[in-house]
Image (cartoon, rainbow, N blue to C red):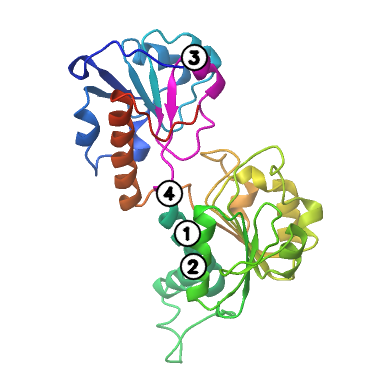
């Protein structure tokens, strides 16, 4: 459907509903601001959305939810830019019905997330953080040996890493794994054809053969709790499970039980079932969990790329040639 644009760039208003997570002040919004009057809100509560965007033609959101009820109250908005790859925060169908173009920002954080997978994995395998804390407590200074370490730590070489999902991030993870001389298994939507990057296998085969499993699939009905009690019961002893995708891919109750029963060596995650989490969450307090706070996407380089693509998306929209359109 052809959309008629009724404004000139100099009269356009752009509202960012939750600017702080993307840019807490260390980056510039200049590339976005060139396209109109830019209004920034660090965060926007659900009940504040309509007031904040009342006269805006362009709305940008990261995690602020724009549901059907909200979209139906929009009077001027003709473009919604999601400042992330995932766009489940916007009711895509409602936006389409109201002739509102919705775009996302694909691929900006691929290398950052892949890097973070190995930051988590190396913490599980080498435990640099733990040893740093012990040494700051003078444990090395009080030792009689020239070296100091507690417990076993391991090489990645020849370990088998199972990559669940073979999109851009999965492929980037595979390349890093190859640099560590790891054996690579890939689950790619059930495809079992030859692959130069590793061996494509069934999901059950990947689960049962991998020393490390890392998740890189979107959250859908068919992937929710794909790692459940039954799945986890099939993993190798001392398997490390890594999740930088979505928390709901893993059944939390089954996960905690598996950690308690030593079915998993570690659960390493950058995503959580509620963000921010509740105080004293049992998974956070568990000694076999390694957790970061949904930061894998947010390297300075990735956030810079994201803002650049956001600006490109707006320019393409203004020129009647939308890119990265999801509806």
Mark 3 lies on a secondary structure that is helix
Mark found first going from the N terminus, 2 or 3? 3
Q: Which residues are magenta?
A: 81-109
Work out whether mark 4 precedes mark 3 in sequence or the reverse, and give the earlier one. 3
Circle 2 packing at 10 Å, graded few (<14), some (14-19), many (20+), is some
How far apart marks 4 and 3 lie (CA) works out to 27 Å
Q: Looking at the rendering, which quadrant does residue 23 occupy?
A: top left
| In the rendered image, the vertical position of residue 102 relative to residue 165, given as above or below | above
Q: Which residue is mark 2?
A: 175
User: Position of 7 compared to 221: left or right?
Assistant: left
CA gap, disc 2 to disc 3?
A: 42 Å
SS at mark 2 in the image: helix
2 and 3 marks in contact (CB < 8 Å): no
Q: Which mark is residue 221?
A: none
Residue drawn at x 43%, y 35% as measured from the top left: 104
Label 3: how many Cα within 10 Å (few below 14, some 14–19, many 20+): some
Look at the numbered discs 2 and 4 and tell me whether their residues touch, using CB distance below 8 Å: no
- Across and down, in percent, residue 132 comes to 43, 71
Alpha carbons under labels 2 and 1: distance apart = 9 Å
Q: Which residue is mark 3?
A: 70
Q: Which residue is mark 4?
A: 297
* Left or right of residue 207, residue 23 in this image: left
Residue 114 horizontal side relative to residue 162, left or right: left
């Amino acid at each position: 459907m052809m959309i008629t644009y009724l404004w000139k760039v100099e009269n356009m208003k752009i509202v960012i509903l939750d600017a702080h997570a993307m840019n807490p002040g260390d980056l510039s919004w200049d590339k976005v601001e060139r396209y109109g009057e830019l209004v920034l809100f660090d965060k926007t509560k659900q009940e504040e959305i309509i007031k904040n965007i009342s006269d805006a033609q362009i709305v940008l959101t990261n995690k602020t939810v724009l549901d059907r009820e909200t979209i139906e109250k929009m009077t001027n908005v003709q473009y919604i830019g999601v400042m992330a790859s995932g766009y489940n925060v916007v009711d895509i169908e409602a936006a389409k019905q109201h002739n509102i173009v919705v775009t996302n920002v694909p691929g900006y954080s691929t290398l950052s997330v892949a890097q973070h997978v190995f930051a988590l994995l190396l913490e599980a395998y080498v435990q640099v953080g733990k040893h740093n804390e012990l040494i700051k407590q003078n444990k090395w200074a009080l030792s009689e040996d020239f070296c100091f370490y507690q417990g076993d730590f391991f090489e990645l070489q020849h370990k088998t890493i199972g990559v669940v999902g073979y999109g851009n991030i999965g492929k980037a993870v595979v390349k890093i794994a190859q640099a560590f001389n790891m054996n690579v298994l890939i689950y790619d939507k059930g495809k079992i054809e030859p692959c130069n990057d590793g061996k494509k296998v069934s999901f059950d085969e990947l689960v049962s053969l991998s020393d490390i499993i890392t998740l890189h699939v979107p959250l859908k009905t068919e992937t929710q709790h794909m790692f459940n009690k039954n799945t986890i019961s099939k993993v190798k002893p001392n398997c490390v499970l890594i999740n930088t995708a979505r928390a709901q891919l893993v059944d939390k109750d089954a996960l905690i039980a598996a950690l308690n029963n030593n079915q998993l060596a570690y659960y390493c995650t950058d995503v959580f079932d509620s963000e921010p989490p509740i105080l004293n969450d049992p998974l956070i307090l568990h000694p076999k969990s390694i957790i970061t706070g949904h930061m894998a996407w947010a390297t300075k380089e990735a956030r810079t790329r994201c803002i650049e693509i956001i600006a490109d998306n707006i320019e393409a929209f203004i020129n009647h040639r939308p890119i990265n359109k999801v509806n």
